Amino acid sequence: MRNRVLWAYIVFVHGLLVLALAKSDVLSRLERRLGFRPAPEITDHFGRMVSYHIRMDGHVPAGAVVFIGASHTQGLATDAVAMPSVNYGIGGDTTVGALIRLPRYRSLDRAAAVVLSLGMNDLARRGNDEIVANYQRILSALPPGLPIVVTALFPVDAASTTDPLPSVSNARIAGVNSALESLCATDPRCVFVDVGPRLTDKAGNLSKANHVGDGVHLSDEGYRIWIEGLRNALLTAKGRPAPRGGQ
């Protein structure tokens, strides 16, 4: 009898524990830590950042260059590339996030150009074809005649990454970049810029001098190279004649 009561008690306690875990985010966080479930794509941070952007957007001057991207863009001093400019970078953002927030930025209707740097955070969530398809939707959502600069995904240094993901490799990044370059070539507004070859070491990895130690995010020297490439790409994009008949 005592054994039955003891076992019933153990089962009851474990049932309560499982229920408590199920109602908390402990299991979700553990699953994400182990790589079973990706972190949420549209986060509270995303919502807060977009709300700040909307506060700015109404007083962005005409003729500004609008920068839209993820953490690389958020850490970019955009005035070092073009003035006036506005930085709409959100760390962790994806092509899906960009599609959600693009319609909120009315400043795009009076912008001199837009710079897009997206896709790195998509690698853990979707295949290459879907990333490129989302980019196509982004290009289609931008105002007709607006010059566009699309930045290639940056290489990584897998040996230094603090949070390695099997879905992220330089070979895959090269495949996405090739597809994005082809996509950009179909849109007369679009200029594709790839500074990756200037950022890599002899093995094709993001060189240690060009990242901050995490194998992903650019150092001051890495940003200098990217800024130079962006300046040249913007000169090309803004120097093209406006396309006729919509795009």
Image (spheres, helix red, strand yellow):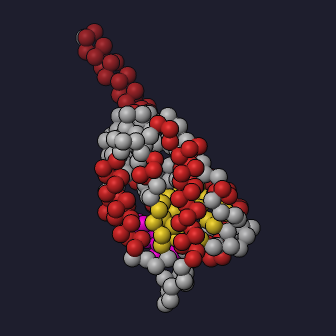
Q: Is residue 23 left or right of residue 170?
A: right
Residue 19 can be seen, yes or no: no
Give the magenta part as a residue range.
Answer: 134-143
Q: Position of residue 91 (x, y in %)?
A: 54, 49
Percent x, y of residue 61: 73, 70
Q: Position of residue 89 (x, y in %)?
A: 58, 55
Query: Looking at the image, which is closer to me, 201 or 116?
Result: 201
* Quarter the N terminus occupies: top left
Q: Residue at x 50, y 34 (%)?
A: 213
Q: Main secondary structure of the magenta part?
A: helix
Which residue does the image show at 35% across and 24% down from the upper left?
14
Q: Considering depth in this image, is 24 or 13 the residue closer to the camera?
A: 24
Is residue 239 depicted above or below 87 in this figure?
Answer: below
- Vertical position of residue 42 compared to residue 187: above or below: above
- Compare residues 151 and 167 and report the one nearer the observer: 151
Residue 79 to residue 148: above or below: above
Please tell me which residue is depicted at 43% across the width and 77% down the height of the picture: 187
View extreme (top): residue: 2
Front in this rendered view, residue 36 or 155 = 155
Extreme bottom residue here? 245
- Residue 222 lies, in percent from the top left, at 53, 46
Left or right of 62 in this view: 183: left
Image-based side of 96 in relation to 203, left or right:
right
Residue 162 colored in magenta in the image? no
**Would you place residue 20 above or below residue 37 in this image?**
above
Residue 180 visible? The answer is yes
Q: How many marks?
A: 0
Within the magenta stretch, is there residue 141? yes
Task: Identify the residue at image location x=50%, y=76%.
Answer: 189
